[in-house]
């Protein structure tokens, strides 16, 4: 069996094309499903594209391969993003995406690890995913396994005390096989993070908790890859990659608008969004019939 990484990895142009497809899939899923969280899905597309199409050791044909890397979506409301990525990576047919939130679907509003191939943890309650991921990283060490655990947390989520409890314990345990991305899009459901419960100085906070911290543009593949590459060769501490992102990235009327944290699209908004994301012709299910 291979190491689970795509042969030769994908070049930047191909990664950008994959990211565009994933953005369109997210928009179409939420439109067809009648609700969802588009803003926080679109802000993390480049991060998950990089993980699943360049770095993570996984086998879509064998989702339970014991030596696989793990990904934990701690900000569980971004489930449509994970669904789109897993489908594009080959864990299940892309036609499943059309069933998002429909009766009898496997693809519910939040991840269910028992229903979705490739989903490692059922998440939804904010703050909990990072704790579970830390336990996975510790288990890898105890079992002397080579796997790494990647996590996506949100900035609004960092207002949860459980995040900081885990920050303490992961540093104490020196879990250097734990790589966390903070999706710093600066908005949450009720408004701007800084106006509700500011995290600043967020970079210095994580450093003070004895994490290895980097700060990047979360939409720049080159910066994302440099940060992961550094984390992979830096030992002795868990890794925090603070990724500055734009909520609703790629859709003009969603960008940096907290109203699109959780909101469905009407027909006109759907058509405009799909056109801006490069769809030749937006139509119900048209992107997901493959």
Image (tube, rainbow, N blue to C red):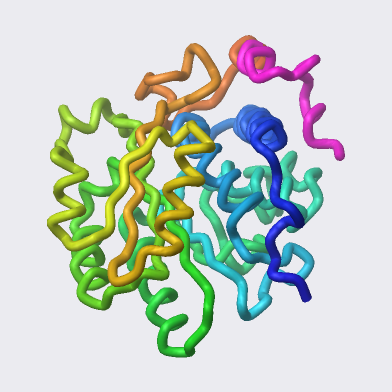
Residue 115 painted magenta: no
Q: Report the residue at 49% width, 32% height from top.
A: 220
Report how many numbered discs are placed on residues in the image. 0
Residue farthest bottom in this picture: 143
Q: Report the residue at 29% width, 42% height from top.
A: 155
Position of residue 219 relative to residue 73, above or below, is above
Residue farthest right in this picture: 290
Give x and y (percent) for residue 47.
51, 43
Give x and y (percent) for residue 273.
61, 16
Q: Report the residue at 58% width, 65% height from top.
A: 113
Say left or right for 217 vs 267: left
User: Dividing the image into 4 quarters, which one contains the N terminus?
Assistant: bottom right
Q: Quadrant of residue 17?
A: top right
- Per the rendered image, the range of residues in magenta is 272-290
* Residue 29 visible at all: no
Q: Main secondary structure of the magenta part?
A: loop
Position of residue 72 relative to residue 98, above or below, is below
Give x and y (percent) for residue 128.
34, 62
Say left or right for 90 vs 50: right
Say left or right for 103 vs 213: right
User: Dividing the image into 4 quarters, which one contains the C terminus?
Assistant: top right
Say left or right for 10 vs 120: right
């Amino acid at each position: 069996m291979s190491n689970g990484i795509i042969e030769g990895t994908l070049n930047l142009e191909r990664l950008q094309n994959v990211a565009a497809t994933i953005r369109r899939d997210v928009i179409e899923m939420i439109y067809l499903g009648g609700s969802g969280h588009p803003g926080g899905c679109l802000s993390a597309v480049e991060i998950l594209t990089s993980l699943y199409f360049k770095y993570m050791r996984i086998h879509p044909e064998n989702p339970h391969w014991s030596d696989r890397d793990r990904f934990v979506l701690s900000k569980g409301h971004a489930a449509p993003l994970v669904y789109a990525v897993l489908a594009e990576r080959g864990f299940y047919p892309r036609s499943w995406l059309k069933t998002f939130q429909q009766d009898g679907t496997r693809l519910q509003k939040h991840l269910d690890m028992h229903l979705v191939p490739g989903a490692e943890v059922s998440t939804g309650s904010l703050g909990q995913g990072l704790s579970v991921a830390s336990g996975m990283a510790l288990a890898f060490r105890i079992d002397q396994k080579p796997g790494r655990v990647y996590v996506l947390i949100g900035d609004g989520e960092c207002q949860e005390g459980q995040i900081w409890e885990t920050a303490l314990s992961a540093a104490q345990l020196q879990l250097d096989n734990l790589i966390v991305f903070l999706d710093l899009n600066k908005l949450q459901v009720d408004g701007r993070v800084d106006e509700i419960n500011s995290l600043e100085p967020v970079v210095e906070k994580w450093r003070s908790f004895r994490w290895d911290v980097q700060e990047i543009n979360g939409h720049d593949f080159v910066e994302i890859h440099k940060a992961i590459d550094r984390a992979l060769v830096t030992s002795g501490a868990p890794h925090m990659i603070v990724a500055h992102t734009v909520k609703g990235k790629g859709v003009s009327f969603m960008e940096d608008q907290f109203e699109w944290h959780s909101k469905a699209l009407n027909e006109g908004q759907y058509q405009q969004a799909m056109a801006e994301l490069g769809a030749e012709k937006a139509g119900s299910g048209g992107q997901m019939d493959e």
